């Protein structure tokens, strides 16, 4: 029996609605394009392409970031090396002038104030390379005195020594610091490191012996016994200062830049009280303009050394910083030897090679 006409129309309408749903037609109630429509499929493809491009950009930026950091690190290492070499030879030229031979304390105070100014600029909010941490002046006085001796005694050594001996004597810092740490803090170092320090110490001894002998040629730079005394006294003062810096950082819970920010101005002011009894300014009036320019250049080098050392330690760590120190030692010793006027057959060259082999090993 045939079904009623109205029932057949209703069933037909139901089938048409199912076909309409299966075809993912427009939803009249929401007015949105269905998921399976051609327009939405194109949009999905476009979004996938955009996502792929973003991923590629992120990967490229990730690859470029280490390259940029590596380039900056190499640049700061180069600046630090050149500034260190520059400040040693600049100071040697300054102290060779009779007008500035008796101005060691004033010169050290000048460097402290330059360092303090540099750190002040670096701590400003615009740069914010470190956050200043105030420390009581009374607490810093012993460290400031050690810091002053750490600068004055090596500068005095440079006045009476050749550049080669001056730099090689600084190699003794490592064994002296190790000895102080062992005596006062019972801190030991690996046995292989001790074996490496032995040839370094022997090499410095050989150089100090031959370099302090009176040269047959007046043009050859040599080291006086006064220079040797100042050099070894400077090594002891620098070693004590190095150990104290580490102790102060742990006790005060500050980093090296925060500690130097506090102690540099204290050391500079402290030395000003000593200047009237140690320095002679009467001869400065006869100094040439070129010498004053060298003094300003020395201050610039000091700022660059402090700034670059901050980036080297932060970007490469203390170990790489030590490697940079060895590189600077080799460069300064080589240039000092070339400028000293000594021949290749000079007996002190054996001590130089032995000392350098000891620090590199």
Image (tube, grey):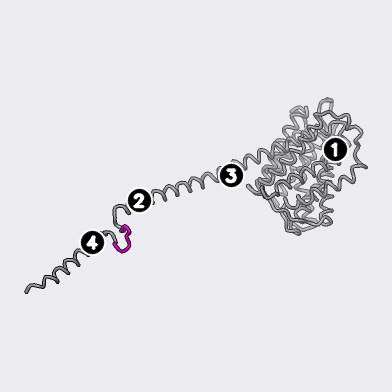
Q: CA distance from mark 2 to mark 3?
A: 37 Å
Give the foreground label among 4 and 1: 4
**Discs 4, 2 touching: Cβ within 8 Å:** no
* Residue with the mark numbered 4: 20
Give the foreground label among 1 and 3: 3
Q: Residue at x 90, y 36 (%)?
A: 281
* Residue with the mark numbered 3: 69
Q: CA distance from mark 2 to mark 1?
A: 78 Å
Give the foreground label among 2 and 1: 2
- The tag earlier along the polypeptide, 4 or 1, is 4
* Residue with the mark numbered 2: 45
* Residue with the mark numbered 1: 227
**Discs 1, 3 touching: Cβ within 8 Å:** no
Along the line of sight, the residue nearer the viewer: 258 or 323: 258
Q: Does 142 appear in magenta?
A: no
Q: Is residue 8 left or right of residue 135?
A: left
For the C terminus, the image quarter is: top right
Dot 4 falls on a residue whose secondary structure is: helix
């Amino acid at each position: 029996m045939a079904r009623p006409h109205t029932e057949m129309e209703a069933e037909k309408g139901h089938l048409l609605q199912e076909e309409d749903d299966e075809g993912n037609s427009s939803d009249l109630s929401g007015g949105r394009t269905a998921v399976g429509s051609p327009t939405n499929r194109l949009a999905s493809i476009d979004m996938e392409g955009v996502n792929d491009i973003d991923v590629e950009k992120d990967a490229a930026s990730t690859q470029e970031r280490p390259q940029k950091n590596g380039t900056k690190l190499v640049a700061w290492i180069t600046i630090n090396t050149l500034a260190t070499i520059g400040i040693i030879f600049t100071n040697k030229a300054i102290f060779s002038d009779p007008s500035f031979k008796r101005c060691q304390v004033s010169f050290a105070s000048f460097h402290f104030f330059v360092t303090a100014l540099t750190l002040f600029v670096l701590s400003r909010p615009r740069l914010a390379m470190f956050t200043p941490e105030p420390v009581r002046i009374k607490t810093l006085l012993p460290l400031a005195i050690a810091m002053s001796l750490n600068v004055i005694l090596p500068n005095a050594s440079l006045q009476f020594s050749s550049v080669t001996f001056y730099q090689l004597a600084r190699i003794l810092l490592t064994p002296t610091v190790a000895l102080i740490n062992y005596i006062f803090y019972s801190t030991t170092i690996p046995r292989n490191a001790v074996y490496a320090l032995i040839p370094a110490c022997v090499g410095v001894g050989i150089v100090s012996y031959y370099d302090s002998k009176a040269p047959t040629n007046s043009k050859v730079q040599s080291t006086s016994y006064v220079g040797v005394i100042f050099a070894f006294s400077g090594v002891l003062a620098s070693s004590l200062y190095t150990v104290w810096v580490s102790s102060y950082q742990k006790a005060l819970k500050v980093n090296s830049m925060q500690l130097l920010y506090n102690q540099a101005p204290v050391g500079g002011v402290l030395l000003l009280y000593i200047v009237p009894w140690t320095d002679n300014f009467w001869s400065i009036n006869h100094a040439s303009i070129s010498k004053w320019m060298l003094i300003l250049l020395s201050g610039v080098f000091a700022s660059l050394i402090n700034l670059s050392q901050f980036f080297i330690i932060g970007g490469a760590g203390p170990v790489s910083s030590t490697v940079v120190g060895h590189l600077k030692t080799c460069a300064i010793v080589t240039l000092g030897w070339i400028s000293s006027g000594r021949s290749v057959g000079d007996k002190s060259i054996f001590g130089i090679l032995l000392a350098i082999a000891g620090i590199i090993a």
